[in-house]
Image: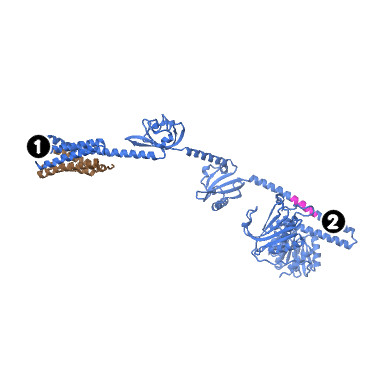
Amino acid sequence: MIQENEIVMLIIGLGVFIFILGNRSQLKRIPHADWLLVGFHTLLAGWILTVAENVLWGEVLNYLEHICYAMASLLLAAWCWKVFRGKREAI
Amino acid sequence: MHPVAIFDFITVLGSLTALVLLVSGWNRALRRDAKLLFAGFLSLLMFYGLCLFLEWAGITTALDSMEDFIGALLPMWFAFVIYAFLQEISGRDLRISEDRLRRILDSVQTGVVVIDPEAHTIVDVNPVAAKMIGADKEQIVNRICHKFICPAEQGACPITDLDQSVDKSERELLTADGTAVPILKTVVPVLLGGREHLLESFLDITELKQAEDALRASEEEYRSLVESTEDSVYLVDSDCKYLFMNEKHRSRFDLPLTEIIDRPYAQFHSKEEAETFFGRVKQVTETGRSVWHEYRSQRDGRYFLRTLSPVAGADGKTVAVTVVSKDITERKSLEAQLQHVQRMEAIGTLAGGIAHNFNNLLMGVRGHLSLMSLDADDPNAIRERLKKMEQLVESGTQLTSHLLGYAREGRYEVKTISLNQLVTETADTFGMTKKEITIHLELADDVPGIQADYGQIEQVLWNLFVNASDAMPGGGNLFLKTMNVTHEDMKGSLYVPKRGNYVLLIVTDTGEGMDEKTMGRAFDPFFTTKGIGQGTGLGLSSAYGIVKAHGGYLDVESKPGTGSTFKVYLPASEEEVQDVVKSPSEVVKGTGSVLLVDDEDLVLDVGMELLEVMGYRVFAAKDGREAVEIYRSNQGDIDMVILDMVMPGMGGGEAFDRLKEINPNVRVLLASGFAVDGEAAQILERGCNGFIQKPFNMKELSEKIDEIMNMP
């Protein structure tokens, strides 16, 4: 059964996604922006899957949802490593 | 434990790791607010993962509501993170822009200040501006801008409108020590730190102003020079379009300057004047040399001496021509008056000279006549006196010959002769009479013939040689040199020679020479430095006249104590040199009939007697009409006619034409007291066989008659 909070999370997530698309060229100037944005997109995929699992393939999509959350956290950690620990790169 | 819990645990660990990395590198990259927001996002993600882990690990479901709340908050928080990052980027852009501006300000060589337009305070200043003001940056920043820039405008600053920009206005900069410096200022609005400011850049134009002042002063000097002159001064381009003119010249047009400048010269002058002027301008443009000429304006009839000088452009080519036109009308008038006075003086001198010389001759003749009346019974004494009287008459004849020479007339028999031959022969004869003078000949072999009267040029040589001889009373050297020259070699003379080839004879003596004053009058008739009775003063003047009559030029160079050099230029002839037959020394007698025509009874009587003595039968006529009648009646008996040129009624010219109508082959010898030039020359051109100058003696007449009688 689809929960309301999941729908809200998805809608806000998609809104942010659209915002990111609109400012993509500016955001590309963030150091190692790909890691950050891919991390967010993975998170967004998790939010999509948490809604989708209520419709079909509940168990599989649930697995994938949590895998996406894990992947997103790892990608964000990698970005933090690159930006705060790695070689300095001018913005 | 459910496998999903493992992934959630990884999520917790990943988020925690990211958070640790962020905190550990807190001082690196990103603005503080962006890092705080991102740290918050990682914390929320970590808590979200923890809630999921506790639920799926089966530990507790008490945090479900917290999980739902964080889940909804996560994307919203991430939006804040993204916004913060975008702010970070634009902030960095601004800092980069400001940094670049700072670098530009520090590197430009003009003074730049940034002004807060509301407070009118200086916000920033570049090193050049600080140096120009003469104070440190700290002493300038935050001061009212009018303290240093545009001090006169304090309280009434025109630049308060930020949309307005000022471009290249001349203002003043007040330095720290109170000196006012002229500046060229440009103002533009700029956005700095999110606020509108005014960026004023300025250049010290003290040197430029000084140069401008100097240029203005120089222009003023030149303008006053050009405007204060009494001459017309104007500038035209190569197409003769007016570019500039002074007031003096403009006043001649009676038009405003705007209606003259950029208009062609031809618009204001006649076609003839315009063509002449254009030719001169073209000459200057092509040669790059100044030319001058006199002309008379058709507008007002005034005379001008006009000098045209080239104005060179940057490439050295003539781009314009400066014309200075001096009104010489008054000078011409004075010159004409002076020339008239001089002419009258010359005529007076001439008349006095002639009267003096002829009086002497006549005195001699009268004296002998008086003595003859006393010696009436002594034939020998009478014969002796007659011989002396004939010598006196011969002297008179020579005197008139000299006078005709001075009058530049008397080219009696023009032939192509060799100047070298004439010089050699005359020098030989002269050398025999003047043993104390050594003659040096240096005659060029290749000199061509000259169209000249042998006797006249011989007279020129004799005059020059005698003059040299008189300058060397104790003897000396006389150098005679001939060579070929052209008009180009005669540059620098007072006259402008006609184009062509010339034969030059240089006569140089080693005598006492002449001073400037004497040299200036050397060719004046009856001017002589010799003692009374030693010279007529006609030698050089007649030489000058003869040379001029032959189309030549006679120059003299001399200095006291260094001798004199006379240069005779005679036009070279392309014709073959003709042999000069020397006249026999005795009277040539002949046979036949001669018609003698003269309106003077005395001449007619003497002429008839002379002709009869020579062996001719004589017909006499007193004018042209009678001569024509006699010739028509006795055509078969008359072998030649001696025809006077000037007679009352029918003159010699008309009579000659009538005789020619009767007999185209009639032989006529023209006789006249006037020179061969003018009407006589025209009669000779119409076929007259010869000319004899009155007064002539028996020998000369016999030679002429013999020459014509023996013509084929």
What color was chain A assigned in the picture? brown
**Foreground: A30 or B486?**
A30
Rendered residue at 46%/32% (across/down): B179
Residue B355 falls within the magenta-colored stretch: yes
Camera-near label (2 vs 1) is 1
Secondary structure type for disc 2: helix
Q: Position of residue B128 (x, y in %)?
A: 41, 37
Q: Residue beneath label 2, please?
A: B366
N-term-proximal mark, 2 vs 1 = 1
| Horizontal side of residue A5 vs B172, given as left or right | left
**Which chain: blue?**
B
**Crowd class of label 1 (few under 14; some 14 to 19; many from 20; radius 10 Å):** few
First to last magenta residue range = B347-358
Q: Position of residue B191 (x, y in %)?
A: 34, 36
Q: Residue beneath label 1, please?
A: B59
Secondary structure type for disc 1: loop
| Horizontal side of residue B290 vs B140, given as left or right | right
Residue A11 placement: quadrant: top left
Q: Quadrant of the N terminus of chain B?
A: top left
Residue B365 placement: quadrant: bottom right
